[in-house]
Image (cartoon, helix red, strand yellow):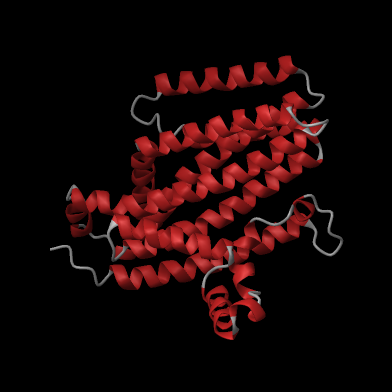
Amino acid sequence: MVMRIFVIAMNAYRESVRARLLIGLFGVAVATCAYAVVVASLSLHQEARVVSDLGSSSISLYAALVAIVLGATSLHREVEQKTVFPILARPLARHEYMLGKYFGALATLLVFIAVDAAIVLAILALLTDQKPALVLGAAAALLAILAGLLVRAKHTRVYVLIPWALAALLAMALLASTAGDDRRLVLSSMLLTLCEVSIVTAVATLFSSFSSPMLTAMFSFGVFIIGRSADTLAHLPARQLGGGARAAGALLARVFPNLNLYVPPRPVLLGQVADLPIWPYVGASALHAAAYSALLLAIAWLMFRKRDFT
């Protein structure tokens, strides 16, 4: 079973990486990093803080958009191209196919987040006391290695992006050691973003199991907005809005996933809250995300196994 899920996941990853919309969103993410450098140059001795704040926020936002797009289009693309019929005609359970699609989307998001975070960390290294020649030389070496791998691996070139993205992230994280707390903020925010997009992808997978791509994207984006507003909805002022609105907001905050857990304030990300150390917080958030995603995927499987493709 594991091998069948892995094969489906890698095939879904290969299709997702080649999507033009994903490439466009990655270009926007890189442009946002460049914009962060421009804004940082206008600040007064707060360049690293501006870059880390804007960079981590952009990673979180664009990764969520990518998760919605992938979840909304992955299954529909195979149904539209009729490639799902021979796949499901084989000895492959529907939950294995659905899990493969889910993990393929997560692999794509992992590459997207890792590369984006590596760029932010490289900028932080350049803005702090790290030697520019060392940072630029490492970046040039990584790009040269990637080019060589893409040339040599003709049939598996898309898969080399996974280890390369992780290696680039590790290299830039080491070089950005001079950034101190700002490096910690980017790394912890990146891990929390992975947790958040695992839930968003599970939500999109659930809706795509019975709905069209447009409705899936709309519903998933709505869940994302409500999840990011869960704390606000749970504490609506009854005096201004009435008891009914407060009760409705509290109900929505309980039913929908609280995505505010994955975008905590800066002091939490820096570990400056005495009773809330950052790495145990990230671990608890990861467990919460895994449990919520498993629940959503179980519901998606119940919906998907009843779907008729004839």
Which quadrant would residue 123 be assigned to in this image?
A: top right
Can the viewer see residue 194 in this picture? yes
Q: Camera-side residue: 82 or 53?
A: 53
Q: Which residue is drawn at 31% across and 64% down?
A: 209
Residue 17, given in percent of the width and then of the height, sits at 39, 38
- In the picture, the quarter occupied by the N terminus is bottom left
What number of labels is visible? 0
Residue 185, given in percent of the width and then of the height, sits at 73, 45
Q: Which residue is drawn at 38% across and 54% down?
A: 71
Q: Camera-side residue: 54 or 205?
A: 54
Q: Residue at x 44, y 58 (%)?
A: 221
Please state if 183 lies on the left or on the right of 98 as rendered. right
Please state if 285 lies on the left or on the right of 21 as rendered. right
Indicate whether 173 appears above or below 80: above
Q: Camera-side residue: 57 or 102?
A: 57
Which quadrant would residue 38 be assigned to in this image?
A: top right
Residue 257, given in percent of the width and then of the height, sits at 54, 68
Indicate whether 92 appears above or below 123: below
Can the viewer see residue 171 in this picture? no
Residue 286, given in percent of the width and then of the height, sits at 62, 60
Which quadrant would residue 259 be assigned to in this image?
A: bottom right
Q: Residue at x 80, y 58 (%)?
A: 277
Q: Residue furthest left?
A: 310
Q: Residue furthest bottom?
A: 243
Please state if 173 lies on the left or on the right of 252 as rendered. right
Q: Which residue lies furthest to the right in this view?
A: 274
- In the picture, the quarter occupied by the C terminus is bottom left
